[in-house]
Every structure is written in C-alpha cells, then in structure tokens.
Amino acid sequence: MDSPLEILKQIIDPDVGVNIVDLGLVESISEQDGHLHVALLMTTPACPQSGFMKDEVRRLLPGASVEVVDHPLWQPTRMSAAAKAQLGWS
C-alpha cells in the first residue's frame, strides 16, 4: 500500500502541471486516532486552486481532514529537483 505522500503525488497543480508533493505544497501529514490530517500550503495566500486541492486530497484519502495553512510562506526552495527540472529551473 502506498503512503499518503505517494498517493498525493497523483494530484497535479492545474496551473503549473506538477504534482503537489514535488511542488512542496504538502506542509504536513499527521495521524491521530487513526484519522489523517493533511495541511497544504499554497504558492500564494489567495490561490484560486486551494478548494480544488482540498477536494482532491479528500477524494484520494477518504476521511482525511484537510486544511490550507498560510505559514510558512511557500518558497521555490520547497520544490524537489524533479519539479525544478520539469519547469526548466535547473
């Protein structure tokens, strides 16, 4: 069985075309009493895709609670080498 982080790699940011894990949008995944909690960090505080991202996490991880956090601020340094290469940043 894939880990929650591996499962979330299926979610592609529609504005950028890179999965949310490699973009560094997954701030944390925690489990308490058998329930997952996922905290997402958008590239900008007013990101219009935040609702879509939350819905996708809930679809792929049924029963998970999802929140969008605004701290810390997203920085390009959060991206994986694969994401940077995909975007032509390397």
Image (tube, rainbow, N blue to C red):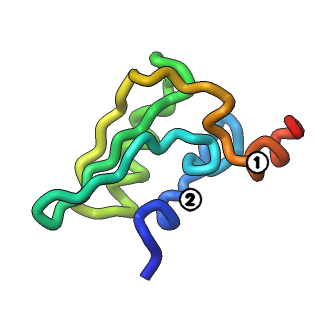
The residue beneath circle 2 is 9
Q: Give the SS element for disc 2.
A: loop
The residue beneath circle 1 is 81
Image location (x, y in percent) of residue 83: 74, 46
The residue shown at (39%, 35%) is: 51
The residue shown at (38%, 46%) is: 28
Q: In the image, is 80 to the left or to the right of 41?
A: right
Q: Give the SS element for disc 1.
A: helix
Q: CA distance from mark 1 to mark 2?
A: 15 Å
Q: Is residue 10 above or below residue 41?
A: below
Q: Is residue 62 above or below residue 28?
A: below
The residue shown at (84%, 46%) is: 85
Image location (x, y in percent) of residue 12: 60, 50
Q: Indicate which disc, 1 or 2, sits on the residue closer to the N terminus.
A: 2
Q: What kind of residue is marked 2?
A: Lys
Q: In the image, is 27 to the left or to the right of 22?
A: left
Image location (x, y in percent) of residue 89: 86, 35
Q: In the image, is 63 to the left or to the right of 81?
A: left
Q: Is residue 11 above or below residue 2?
A: above
Q: What kind of residue is marked 1?
A: Ala
